Image (cartoon, rainbow, N blue to C red):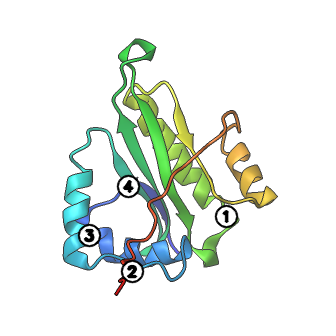
């Protein structure tokens, strides 16, 4: 298949990245390419933040997003949030996800972060075991609040 490379995403990677995200949330609506490019430019405005990619040969097989967040606690040291961790379905259980997460956390430490955190919505024990094997500990309880769909109901 070729050499495996882990690197930061570039704008030219967006079509393949949007395809890869279908392995994260099948059927999820993707932005069109011009919108994705604008979002990518906006994302890069956050210093230290990056979309990490893993390629095997010329095939994009894994990714995660790293966001470095400024912080007024912990002596002013930032923290990192990792999101959208995905490995192409045909390439799972080959160490790709761990390589992506190792790269992202190394970047977080370089940015001076005191912690890197992620959440998963998965209840599968093998998913939790994967995150533990990548060095993450289930040490906090996560909560989220999602916006309800913007349905407008008409009354007459």
Disc 1 packing (10 Å; few <14; some 14–19; many ≥20): few
Q: Residue at x 45, y 37 (%)?
A: 80
Q: Residue 43 vs residue 102: left or right?
A: left
Q: Which residue is mark 4?
A: 51
Disc 3 packing (10 Å; few <14; some 14–19; many ≥20): some
Image: 96 above or below 67: below
Element at label 2: loop
Residue 2's disc number = none
Q: Residue 102 vs residue 76: left or right?
A: right
Between the residue at mark 4 and the residue at mark 2, the CA separation in whole angstroms equals 38 Å
Of the residues tagged 1 and 3, which is closer to the observer? 3
Between the residue at mark 2 and the residue at mark 1, the CA separation in whole angstroms equals 48 Å
- Residue 85 point in image, percent of width and height: 53, 58
Q: Residue at x 55, y 75 (%)?
A: 23
Question: From this viewpoint, which residue is outermost toward the front?
Answer: 156
Question: Of the residues under marks 4 and 3, which one precedes in the sequence?
Answer: 3
Question: Of the residues under marks 2 and 3, which one precedes in the sequence?
Answer: 3
Between the residue at mark 2 and the residue at mark 3, the CA separation in whole angstroms equals 30 Å
Between the residue at mark 4 and the residue at mark 1, the CA separation in whole angstroms equals 20 Å
Question: Of the residues under marks 2 and 1, which one precedes in the sequence?
Answer: 1
Q: Which residue is mark 2?
A: 153
Q: Residue at x 52, y 29 (%)?
A: 115
Between the residue at mark 1 and the residue at mark 3, the CA separation in whole angstroms equals 29 Å
Q: Which residue is mark 3?
A: 36
């Amino acid at each position: 298949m070729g050499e495996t490379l882990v690197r930061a995403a570039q704008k030219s990677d967006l079509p393949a990245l949007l395809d890869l995200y279908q392995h994260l949330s099948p059927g999820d609506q993707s932005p069109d390419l011009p919108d994705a490019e604008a979002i990518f430019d906006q994302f890069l405005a956050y210093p230290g933040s990056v979309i990490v990619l893993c390629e095997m040969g010329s095939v994009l097989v894994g990714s995660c997003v790293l966001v470095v967040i400024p912080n007024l606690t912990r002596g002013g040291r930032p923290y990192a949030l990792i999101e959208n961790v995905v490995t192409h379905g045909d390439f799972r259980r080959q160490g790709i996800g761990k390589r992506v997460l190792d790269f992202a956390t190394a970047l977080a430490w370089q940015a001076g972060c005191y912690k890197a955190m992620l959440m998963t919505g998965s209840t599968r024990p093998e998913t939790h075991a994967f995150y533990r094997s990548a060095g993450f500990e289930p040490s906090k309880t996560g909560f989220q609040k999602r916006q309800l769909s913007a349905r407008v109901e008409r009354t007459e």
